[in-house]
Image (cartoon, rainbow, N blue to C red):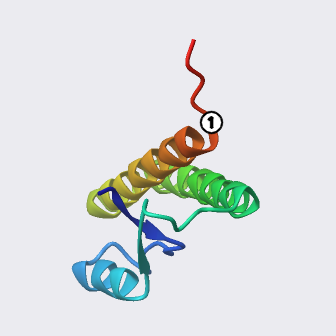
Amino acid sequence: MLLFLIGCPGPANGSLEGLRAAAKGCELGDDAGDFDDLDKMEARLEQLRERHRELDGEIQSLELAGGEAFRVMTLKREKLRIKDQIAWLQTKMTPDIIA
């Protein structure tokens, strides 16, 4: 079973406490039927893409400013998780065509 976090905001800071707080406020979802409506899937996909872009900008600004390495690493990991969620949703939205 594939598990992922639905609608999770990023942690307020790069600390372990911030990560725990973000995880507590998140709803845990699975692929067993959370997205049975195509409109919901498209809306979620757009939310994920928007968050991915936001993280990209935040990472770039932190790197240019010489930000904390731990914070940058945390944001990059979150960005990768979101990228995986985007790929998973796109796969679920594409019909299987047997050639």
Screen quadrant of the C terminus: top right
Residue furthest to the left: 16
Which residue occupies 35% across, 80% down? 23
Q: Quadrant of residue 73?
A: bottom left
Please indicate whether residue 10 sits to the left or right of residue 97 in the image: left
Front residue of 51 and 36: 36
Please indicate whether residue 77 sits to the left or right of residue 51 in the image: left
Please indicate whether residue 89 sits to the left or right of residue 79 in the image: right
Q: Kindly identify the amino acid type of the residue bearing the numbered disc 1.
A: Thr
Please indicate whether residue 73 sits to the left or right of residue 12 in the image: left
Q: Quadrant of residue 74?
A: bottom left
Q: Report the residue marked by disc 1.
A: 94
Q: Quadrant of residue 98?
A: top right
Q: Residues within 10 Å of mark 1 (few under 14, many from 20)?
A: few
Measured as percent of width and height from the top left, residue 96 is found at 57, 30
Which residue occupies 49% across, 70% down? 6
Residue furthest to the front: 98
Screen quadrant of the N terminus: bottom left
